[in-house]
Image (cartoon, rainbow, N blue to C red):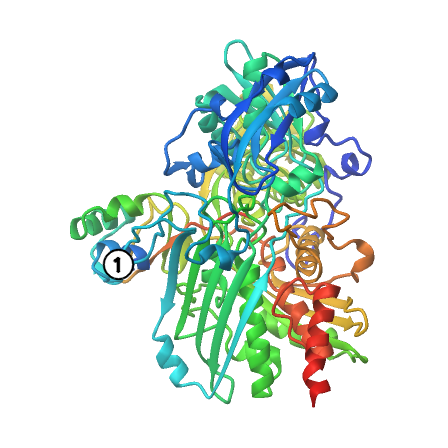
């Protein structure tokens, strides 16, 4: 198992994940699997309208249905004042969150919850939902981001005044804010340019597409203490958010995390958990709510649909002189799209002296957007990386050479302001250039596209504990739900520090009462930040083990070293002692001071930014518009891969999701503003038969701020695929797809439109 | 003196459009106080919910961070988790 080149025994190896067997044999418990005695079934009544005033709700007939124990509406949640509060890891508008969980006064999208029922059976709950009478006054609606910005567009919130403009508007609108990031003098940059490319790019809303629906069991005891079992990206987030929405103290809620069947950012907020709690509080019995798939699509996630304008200028020799972009992102029914992050990431891979990004956050009658891998970045990169492809064509340059010539390096001032420290973008482009894929021959109707992406990566508040068992094994307490194999990476890092075998370390994910607070699993932070806490806790254990050995040998602790999982005398001057293994010290711990354990709480700093470059080959069927991805290679600077298989899995998963975004996935709304494809039959995510094996190249430019050099890896790989696929289509058939997804009908229409001028000639 | 770059919106709203300025501060807490003295109300606006890049490193929670004599300090939106 040891990797002699790196000097590590476990870091960089590929052992089986600790949770793997349970997951492949169906034993693992996900959100919907938990049951309790006396548990009721909760169901949610959702708006059939895109926009309507709720004049009244009459639940009397529902309460008369046999088996119905409680009905809740917005009246059962405290009314929360408008404004952001700092809770957990960032600001949150809890009024918006509350109104999203249960509509108050108005429904703002198809699927918006208006009431919920708890009953002894699903049939009784469904019947009760049918009997709730909601008096709707239907209002005009708007689901398109550009239409929502027009004067006279249907107004979602009468108290929404655009932030970030001067003078401050005296009339409300659907534009929540305008943001701007700029460096240098953009127009002066364009004046230096020999060539300028411009384009407008549109992406549709896509869902995170996790297979496991949102699910929770909640139980409120007679003493007011609450317990929630649920699937989420952070049990501490669920606790904090539920406490605010229900008006109870954090400490009265204990959240027990289940396994999580995918999140991708979509489970960084709450939907059913506070509703189950409110029903349980009213009914006096545990309540379980499991969303159906159509509820997941209609009322959770997705990410923004967007409209992006890009203008790039360059000299004849390929030096980019200026970059300018305007981004319009819809946030769903409440403000807070990731447009700022789109602005910051759009040009981040490049060294530009003159650059500007202006963003607009716009509300529309759609479900409130939730985070999705690298929130905001893929849509911005689609615009910029498509425009760069056009620029390379105009300059007659290889598109990777163009990127290399303008690549950000250590010391480059990032487009969003600060200077980069050690980064590995250049290495990813060089690796893509050197890859055999980039030189492979292409056939008729086939084309190759490339694109790059950047993500910040974050650290954050993290805790961890390492306990030594009496039998010489160790438990790693990792407070973050394991979405992408983090149990394995935590066990590897603990095994490396302790010097024991990987399979002697057992990681667990605890509830909110068993370990101090930790930020969510998200932002590509867990292996980096929680990993640092695990390393710190394991080091504490090693220090304690040395101390115990010193007591056994009756020597000073400085005379003891820890090597390969054993305490040894530091030198012959200390004395002649047989090494004491971790197992031996654990077995004798009662004599030397009791149980051995370490616990660390940190606010992790020094997350290293991540960059990736992708190469994609496609074939376009000119008769049907169908695009087949023939070959795909994802190159990424990963710092150092703790468990390379799961790092490769992150790259492959991100690429697959990005390819789905590029080719098929989209929310389709009716004229009435209702979602027409709320299921996996009509909302088409890529399946295994749609994709080739995605090749990965792990570029390792270690992050000097992490004990093993880790950089976050989960966000970057979803950023390049949209443009990589679109660029490949352009080179396959000569048609630039400015509007994704490039689904067969849309591509066929574009191909037909391109033929018309030829026919006219 | 550290070179401080304010968010565009805040610079326009509270600093008369001045986006870049030099501030004498040894740590983030002193920086906030200095900004608040110069532009009343700015300290409160920058205390929570913002990230800060100091010499290229982004801190989601900068409260305890040191600032060097020649540091570059950028205020940024907090990075959302995906």
Q: Is residue A599 visible?
A: no
Subunit ID for the residue under disc 1 = B
* Vertical placement of residue A600 versus A657, above or below: above
Q: Nearer the viewer, residue A550 or A449?
A: A449
Residue name at image x 45 percent, y 61 percent: A344
Q: Percent x, y for residue A357?
A: 42, 66
Residue name at image x 46 percent, y 88 percent: A194
Residue count near mark 1 (Cα–Cα under 10 Å), binned few <14, some 14–19, many ≥20: some
Residue name at image x 55 percent, y 65 percent: A381
* Vertical placement of residue A404 versus A701, above or below: below
Relative to residue A652, is residue A320 drawn left or right?
left
Q: Percent x, y for residue A353?
A: 39, 75
Q: Is residue A36 visible?
A: yes
Q: Percent x, y for residue A54?
A: 50, 32
* Vertical placement of residue A688 versus A620, above or below: above
**Which residue position is annotated with label 1?**
B12
Residue A228, by quadrant, is top right
């Amino acid at each position: 198992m040891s990797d002699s080149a790196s000097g590590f025994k476990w870091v960089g190896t590929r052992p089986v994940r600790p949770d793997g067997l349970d997951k492949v044999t169906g034993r693992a418990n996900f959100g919907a699997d938990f049951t309790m005695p006396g548990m009721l079934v909760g169901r949610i009544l959702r708006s059939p309208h895109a926009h309507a005033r709720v004049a009244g709700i009459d639940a009397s007939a529902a309460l008369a249905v046999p088996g119905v124990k409680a009905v809740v509406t917005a009246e059962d949640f405290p009314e929360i004042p408008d404004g952001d509060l700092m809770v957990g890891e960032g600001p949150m508008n809890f009024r918006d969150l509350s109104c999203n969980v249960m509509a108050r006064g108005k429904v703002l999208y198809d699927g918006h919850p208006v009431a919920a029922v708890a009953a002894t059976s699903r049939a009784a709950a469904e019947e009760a939902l049918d009997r709730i009478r909601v008096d709707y006054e239907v209002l005009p609606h708007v689901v398109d981001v550009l239409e929502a910005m027009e004067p006279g567009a249907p107004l979602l919130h009468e108290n929404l005044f655009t932030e970030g403009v001067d003078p401050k508007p005296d009339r409300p609108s659907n534009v929540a804010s305008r943001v701007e990031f700029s460096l240098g003098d953009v127009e002066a940059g364009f004046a230096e340019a020999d060539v300028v490319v411009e384009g407008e790019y549109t992406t549709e809303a896509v869902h995170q597409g996790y297979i496991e629906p949102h699910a929770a069991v909640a139980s409120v005891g007679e003493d007011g203490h609450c317990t929630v079992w649920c699937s989420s990206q952070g049990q501490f987030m669920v606790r904090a958010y539920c406490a605010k929405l229900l008006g109870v103290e954090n400490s009265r809620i204990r959240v027990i995390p289940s396994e999580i069947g995918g999140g991708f950012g979509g489970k960084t907020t709450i939907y059913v958990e506070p509703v189950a709690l409110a029903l349980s509080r009213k009914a006096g019995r545990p309540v379980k709510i499991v969303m159906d798939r159509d509820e997941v699509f209609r009322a959770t996630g997705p990410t923004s649909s967007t409209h992006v304008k890009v203008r790039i200028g360059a000299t004849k020799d390929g030096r980019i002189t200026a970059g300018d972009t305007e981004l319009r992102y819809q946030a769903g029914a409440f403000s807070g799209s990731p447009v700022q992050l789109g602005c910051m990431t759009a040009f981040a891979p490049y060294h530009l002296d003159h650059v500007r990004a202006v963003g607009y956050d716009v509300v529309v009658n759609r479900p409130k957007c939730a985070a999705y891998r690298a929130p905001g970045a893929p849509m911005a990169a689609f615009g910029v990386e498509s425009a760069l492809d056009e620029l390379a064509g105009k300059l007659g340059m290889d598109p990777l050479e163009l990127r290399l010539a303008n690549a950000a390096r250590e010391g480059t001032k990032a487009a969003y302001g600060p200077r980069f420290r050690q980064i590995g973008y250049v290495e990813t482009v060089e690796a893509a250039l050197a890859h055999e894929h980039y030189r492979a021959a292409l056939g008729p109707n086939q084309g190759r596209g490339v694109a790059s992406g950047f993500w910040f990566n974050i650290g954050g508040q993290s805790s961890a504990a390492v306990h030594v068992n009496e039998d010489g094994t160790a438990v790693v307490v990792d407070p973050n739900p394991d979405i992408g194999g983090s149990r394995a990476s935590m066990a590897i890092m603990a095994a490396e520090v302790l010097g024991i075998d990987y399979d002697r370390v057992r990681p667990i994910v605890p509830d909110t009462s068993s370990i101090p607070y930790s930020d969510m699993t998200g932002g590509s932070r867990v292996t980096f930040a929680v990993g640092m806490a695990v390393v710190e806790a394991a080091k504490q254990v090693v220090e304690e083990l040395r101390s115990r050995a010193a007591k056994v040998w009756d020597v000073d602790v400085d005379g003891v070293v820890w090597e390969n999982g054993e305490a040894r005398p530091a030198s012959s001057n200390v004395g002649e002692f047989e090494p004491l293994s971790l197992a031996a010290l654990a077995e004798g711990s009662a004599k030397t001071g009791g149980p051995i354990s370490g616990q660390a709480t940190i606010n992790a700093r020094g997350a290293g930014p991540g960059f990736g470059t992708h190469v994609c080959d496609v074939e376009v069927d000119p008769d049907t518009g169908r695009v087949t991805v023939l070959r795909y290679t994802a190159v990424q600077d990963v710092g150092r891969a703790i468990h390379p298989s799961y790092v490769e899995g992150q790259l492959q998963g991100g690429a697959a999701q990005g390819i789905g975004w590029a080719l098929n996935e989209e929310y389709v709304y009716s004229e009435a503003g209702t979602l027409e494809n709320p299921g996996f039959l009509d909302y088409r995510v890529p399946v295994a038969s749609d994709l080739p094996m995605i090749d990965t190249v792990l570029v390792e430019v270690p992050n000097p701020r992490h004990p093993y050099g880790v950089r976050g890896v989960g966000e970057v790989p979803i950023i390049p695929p949209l443009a990589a696929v679109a660029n490949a289509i352009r080179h396959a058939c000569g048609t630039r797809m400015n509007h994704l997804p490039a689904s067969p009908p849309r591509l066929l229409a574009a191909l037909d439109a391109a033929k018309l001028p030829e026919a006219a000639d | 003196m550290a070179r401080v770059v304010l968010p565009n919106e805040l610079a326009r709203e509270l600093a008369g459009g001045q986006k870049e300025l030099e501030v004498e501060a040894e740590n983030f807490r002193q920086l906030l106080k200095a900004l608040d003295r110069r532009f009343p109300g700015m300290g409160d606006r920058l205390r929570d919910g913002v990230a800060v890049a100091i010499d290229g490193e982004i801190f989601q929670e900068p409260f305890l961070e040191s600032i060097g004599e020649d540091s570059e300090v950028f205020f940024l939106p907090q990075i959302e988790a995906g």
